[in-house]
Image (cartoon, rainbow, N blue to C red):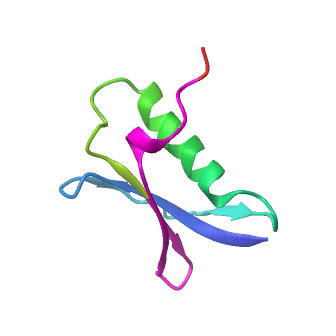
Amino acid sequence: MTTYRFHCTNGLEFYLDTRGQSVAPGESLRGRAEQVAQGLRRRGGDWSTWSVSVHDLDGRRVLLLPVEAALPLAA
């Protein structure tokens, strides 16, 4: 398992993931980022300018997912 941090930002405000999440080999990193994005959208409000910025433990960004690009919320 590899640990990644799923930070969220709109360029001005941010939520830092200080704990990180373990991702199993073969598990979709994008899928996990989409889950984080969906969690933001469940809070309500306008998240259209926000992104989930995924970083490894060395601080390197490995994925940037705009919240709007995440799969739609399940009905």
Q: Is residue 63 magenta?
A: yes
Residue 33 image offset from top left, x and y in percent: 56, 52
- Which is nearer the eye, 26 or 58? 26
Q: Does 61 sit above or below residue 24?
A: below
Q: Which stretch is magenta?
A: 53-73
Q: In the picture, residue 11 is in which quadrant?
A: bottom left
Which residue shows up at 40% across the image and 60% down it?
16
Q: Does 71 sit above or below residue 51?
A: above
Which residue shows up at 25% across the image and 52% down it?
10
Image-based side of 28 in relation to 75, left or right: right
Q: Is residue 36 magenta?
A: no
Furthest residue toward top: 75
Image-based side of 46 in relation to 16, left or right: left
Query: Count of labels shown?
Result: 0
Q: In the picture, residue 3 is in which quadrant?
A: bottom right
Q: Does 68 sit above or below residue 43?
A: below
Residue 66 image offset from top left, x and y in percent: 39, 49
Furthest residue toward bottom: 58
Which residue shows up at 55% across the image and 25% down it?
73
Image-based side of 61 in relation to 25, left or right: left
The image quadrant where one finds the C terminus is top right
The image quadrant where one finds the N terminus is bottom right
Residue 37 image offset from top left, x and y in percent: 48, 42
Q: In the picture, residue 12 is in which quadrant?
A: bottom left
Which residue shows up at 47% across the image and 81% down it?
60
Residue 41 image offset from top left, x and y in percent: 43, 31
